[in-house]
Amino acid sequence: MGGSGSKSKGYWPFPGSSTGSDPAKEGNDQSVARFRCSRNATPLVFTRRSSMFFDEDGDLAHEFYEETIVTKNGRRRAKLKRIQKNLIPQGIVKLDHPCIHVDFPVVLCEL
């Protein structure tokens, strides 16, 4: 299961084609910047959706619990009950440092 097609005729948008043929002959001498402009997108991500919530008191956390007292067979136990109502999502959060988008077609490695 995978993409079909020939590896030798595949489109490679960056100079120094990995298909084994000369990029100047095929006209594939585009740069990363030109590739980005053709998709009208940048490879950097500046914001993300937060996974945290605000409760009624204005506290911010991933999840909230309430301690309840349960009496069973004459014993009193404390039990934590997860609160899932009246929570407001934090929304979109600006990242401290831009990240590279997961769909950007470049392999990064450190030598």
Image (cartoon, helix red, strand yellow):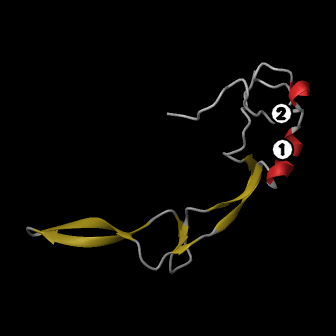
Element type where label 1 sits in the image:
helix
Q: Are marks 2 and 1 in contact (CB under 8 Å)?
A: yes
Q: Residue at x 55, y 64 (%)?
A: 52
Find disc 1 in the rendering and name its residue: 35
The image quadrant of residue 15 is top right
* Amino acid marked by disc 1: Phe
Element type where label 2 sits in the image:
loop
Q: Residue at x 58, y 35 (%)?
A: 3
Does residue 8 sit above or below 87 in this rendering? above
Left or right: 40 as drawn, with respect to 92: right
The image quadrant of residue 83 is bottom left
The image quadrant of residue 84 is bottom left
Left or right: 67 as drawn, with respect to 50: left
Image coordinates for residue 109, horizontal then vertical, percent: 72, 27
Does residue 32 sit above or below 97 in this rendering? above
Image coordinates for residue 111, horizontal then vertical, percent: 75, 20
Does residue 34 sit above or below 95 in this rendering? above
Mark nearer the N terminus (2 vs 1): 2
Nearer to me, 8 or 17: 8
Image coordinates for residue 4, horizontal then vertical, percent: 59, 33
Find disc 2 in the rendering and name its residue: 14
Estimate the spatial distance between the alpha carbons at disc 2 and disc 1, rounded to whole Å. Answer: 8 Å
Nearer to me, 34 or 89: 34
Mark 1 neighbour class, 10 Å CA radius: few under 14, some 14 to 19, many 20 or more = some
Q: Residue at x 50, y 81 (%)?
A: 56
Left or right: 53 as drawn, with respect to 47: left
Nearer to me, 79 or 14: 14
Q: Give me the disc on residue 68.
A: none
Image coordinates for residue 76, horizontal then vertical, percent: 18, 68
Mark 2 neighbour class, 10 Å CA radius: few under 14, some 14 to 19, many 20 or more = some
